[in-house]
Amino acid sequence: MAVSSDSARWEALAAVRTRGDVGDGIASVLALLGRSDVISFAGGFPDPETFPRERIALLLQEFTAGGELSAFQYAPTRGLAGTLDAFADRLERLQGRRPAADELLVTSGAIEALELIGKSFLDPGDVVVLEAPTYLGSIQSFRSFEATIVPVPLDEQGLDVDELERQLGQGLRPKLLYAIPDHQNPAGVSLSAERRATLVELARRFGFLIVEDVAYRELGFEGDSLPSLWSLAPDVVVQAGTTSKTFCPGVRLGWAAGPAEVTARLVSAKQLTDQCASALGQRLFEESERRGWIDDQLVRSRALYQRKGERMLAALERSMPEAVHWTTPRGGFFSWLTLPGINTIDLLGRAAEQGVAAVPGTLFFPDGRGADSLRLSFSLVDEEEIDEGIARLASLVRSGLSPRLGQ
Ligand SMILES: Cc1ncc(COP(=O)(O)O)c(C=O)c1O
């Protein structure tokens, strides 16, 4: 009794913006995901096999033996000078544009960049356009600033920019548009070159800021990529990047690159969140980048994820009924399944009982859509268990489909 009245008491005191509800059905599916006896296509985490543990140990030894102090001290809010320089070099090399000193800051991961952007630009009721489906963390982040979220659909070519233009023509006036142009989470698709050009033109014409999340950009299986939105239009784009998938999430490190006036606001906001990103993480990344270790790691990570992704797609091809569709990722961690006529919250509840997990589609929409879809992640699942996991899922799908669809 005391517990429930306590929880009611704190619920009453909690800020309205923290009371967002993801729904019981979803929560009950998510509760099953941590089980070790489950073949999980749920978590969007990197494979620990990619973590450069020996090299990190070597660097830590060098830092301590060499009397290095900056790794263990507070850092400037914008970032350590050497780390900023390493990020700028990397952006110049990989994206063809070098941010000026006042256009870049180091963040505690991409999620912090989203938090700083929301804090700096959103008042309650301001409009944010998102791709639908999109990264759950972004929905939660923009919601926490009480923004009005407007989902615009995407397809195999990424965000439907014609639909966006139509809505802008009808008076939609977003402050921010959040997009993941490369190997999108959760859809596994990339924004086409033509649509990139259209999108930045719309941002200029209608005066909104594009928030470009490049979390999976460097994980293209072929190592290739289209021009980033930020490199195409540094006047209207702030790019949020992360080292979580290219180095390791444990260092909680990322960057934001954008117009000087924008990054200055982010630096101000950061003084009130963590004051500075982990100096130790900054130094580990900087040294790894300088020695070519990040590129080296990426070569191996891409090959691993490509192998896993292809194995999963082959298993889907072999075992899923014809009515089921999925995207074919060319990088990143995800494929998006559409299962017409099937409620995937129910399906995945039963799947967990059969020892297989994935994430139901509704979680990736801000408005309850996506009930007949789900996200499969191939990044963390044990390679040897992929075939069995997909076979189990397919057999449940077959039993859940109407006889007509199941043929
Ligand atoms: C699209 C996207 N952005 C950002 C993040 C979070 O990145 P970080 O670990 O840098 O906070 C993730 C992690 O899953 C992601 O999928």
Image: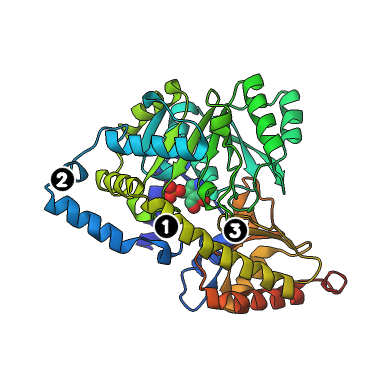
Query: Residue at position x 81%, y 66% from top?
Result: 323
Q: Secondary structure at mark 3?
A: strand
Q: Which of the two labelled residues, at mark 3 and mark 2, occupies the earlier sequence position?
A: 2
Question: In this orientation, which residue lies closer to the viewer: 72 or 85?
Answer: 85
Q: Amino acid at mark 3?
A: Phe
- With 331 as the anchor, is 291 left or right in this view? left
Q: Position of residue 338 (x, y in %)?
A: 73, 60
Name the residue carrying label 1.
Answer: 297
**What's the mark number on residue 141?**
none
Q: Position of residue 380 (x, y in %)?
A: 49, 66
Query: Residue at position x 41%, y 48% from top?
Result: 243
Q: Which of the two labelled residues, at mark 2 and mark 1, occupies the earlier sequence position?
A: 2
- With 82 as the anchor, is 149 left or right in this view? right
The answer to whether residue 271 is visible is yes
Q: Amino acid at mark 1?
A: Gln
Q: Is mark 3 within 8 Å of ligand 1?
A: no
Name the residue carrying label 2.
Answer: 68
Report how far apart the C-alphas of labels 3 and 2 lie in the structure.
40 Å
Report how far apart the C-alphas of labels 2 and 1 lie in the structure.
25 Å
Q: Quadrant of the C terminus?
A: bottom right
Query: Residue at position x 55%, y 51% from top?
Result: 223
Q: Position of residue 113 (x, y in %)?
A: 43, 38
Asked which quadrant contains residue 169, the reply is: top right
Q: Nearer the viewer, mark 1 or mark 3?
A: 1
Q: Is residue 347 above or below residue 169?
A: below
**What's the mark number on residue 334?**
3
- Say whether marks 2 and 1 touch (CB < 8 Å): no
Q: Which of the two labelled residues, at mark 1 and mark 3, occupies the earlier sequence position?
A: 1
Question: In this orientation, which residue lies closer to the viewer: 72 or 399?
Answer: 72
Q: Amino acid at mark 2?
A: Glu
Q: Secondary structure at mark 2?
A: loop
Question: In this orientation, which residue lies closer to the viewer: 262 or 233?
Answer: 233
